Amino acid sequence: MTRFEQEISGLLDKQVAERKGTENNHYWEKSAKAEVEKAVKEADEKAIVEEDGAIRWIASGNYLPDDFCEKLEYAGYAFSREATRQAKEVQSSEAIEAYRRQARQITTEEIEEMRSAFGRGTVVVDIITGQRIAI
């Protein structure tokens, strides 16, 4: 069960109230319902649903994150969460590959900054390119 599901169902409020020995004030449930309304409004104004059902932001072209899609799905919004997830995966893979192709040499100034942050003799690894930099 996701955090959102715990919130919207009231389960999280119940757990918190039991743990604290207080009355359930339904704070998280109310907050989750407000987030759903906000997500729908934002999607209506700033997103577009493609033919296959994937939903993306108009301004950036980025596909919506899954936690945001979860709220839209709860609201019954007309889109495909699975199509969005798949499109986002392709988009992310392409962005990572583009980053790898554009990788450049680290400057002397950047090495000095790394030494200052991590200490001389440390090996810093770019987790996307795999480049290892001995500082």
Image (cartoon, rainbow, N blue to C red):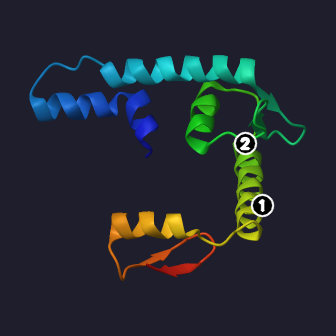
**Mark 1 → mark 2, Cα distance in angstroms:** 13 Å
Position of 63 compared to 40: left or right?
right
Q: Residue at x 69, y 69 (%)?
A: 104
Three-letter amino acid code of the residue under disc 2:
Tyr
Determine crowd level at label 1: few under 14, some 14-19, many 20+ residues with C-alpha closer than 10 A: few
Which is more foreground, mark 1 or mark 2? Answer: 1
Count the labels in the image. 2
Q: Residue at x 79, y 39 (%)?
A: 61
Q: Which of the 4 image quarters holds residue 97?
A: bottom right
Above or below, 31 relative to 48: above
Position of 126 compared to 52: left or right?
left
Secondary element under disc 2, as helix, strand or loop, is loop
Determine crowd level at label 2: few under 14, some 14-19, many 20+ residues with C-alpha closer than 10 A: many
Above or below, 70 relative to 112: above
Position in image of residue 54 (x %, y %):
79, 41
The residue that mark 1 highlights is 94
Secondary element under disc 1, as helix, strand or loop, is helix
| Proximity of marks 1 and 2: CB atoms separated by less than 8 Å | no
Position in image of residue 45 (x %, y %):
73, 17
Position in image of residue 109 (x %, y %):
51, 64
Q: Which of the 4 image quarters holds residue 118?
A: bottom left
Q: Residue at x 79, y 30 (%)?
A: 58
The residue that mark 2 highlights is 63
Which residue, as the protein is rendered here, is positioned at the far right?
51
Above or below, 44 relative to 18: above
Q: Closer to the camera, 103 or 60? A: 103
Three-letter amino acid code of the residue under disc 1:
Glu
